[in-house]
Amino acid sequence: MLRLQRLSSSVPKVLKRNIGIVAPALQKASDPIQQLFLDKIREYKAKSKDGQLVDPTPDIEKERKAELEKLASHYGCSPGTNMSEFPSFSFSDPPVDSGMSQQ
């Protein structure tokens, strides 16, 4: 009987908490500013090709190139290194010498 009372008193609290947490996630973006922001992000993604800048001016391209050269010199890369690409790594397993074969 005591268990039933505890259960009946705690169930509404749990349901209220869960609905309070899930309700915002189920709603669409009702804020017009938020919707405009999402629309602009989608538009920019559609215009962007391979992650490049959209409608860059010559000044912006020159500044971007200068910043990439500054990064390359700061990190000690050779002048021809492309700093906008993720570096590629290759790892090889070291040879394993088993001591069991000499017994």
Image (cartoon, helix red, strand yellow):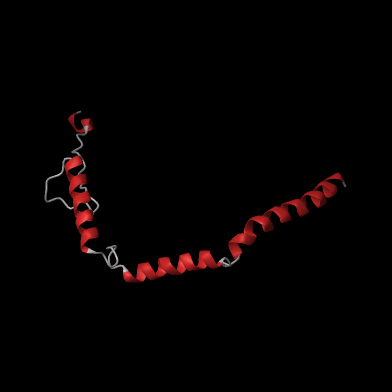
Residue 13 rendering spot, x and y as whole percentages: 75, 51
Inspect this view and state whether residue 88 appears: no
Using residue 101 as the reference point, say whether residue 45 is left or right of it. Answer: right
Q: Residue at x 39, y 70 (%)?
A: 43
Which residue is more in the foreground, 46 or 18?
A: 46
Residue 27, quarter of picture: bottom right
Using residue 58 as the reference point, say whether residue 7 is left or right of it. Answer: right
- Number of labelled discs? 0
Q: Is residue 20 above or below residue 38?
A: above
The residue furthest right is 1
Residue 86 rendering spot, x and y as whole percentages: 25, 52
Residue 98, quarter of picture: top left
The residue furthest top is 103
Which residue is more in the foreground, 67 or 8?
A: 67
The residue furthest left is 79
Which residue is more in the foreground, 74 or 60?
A: 60
Which residue is more in the foreground, 29 or 19?
A: 29
Q: Is residue 66 above or below residue 56?
A: above
Residue 17 rendering spot, x and y as whole percentages: 69, 53
Quadrant the C terminus occupies: top left
Residue 100 rendering spot, x and y as whole percentages: 23, 31
Residue 74, quarter of picture: top left
Q: Residue at x 21, y 30 (%)?
A: 99
Inspect this view and state whether residue 3 appears: yes
Q: Is residue 94 above or below residue 31?
A: above
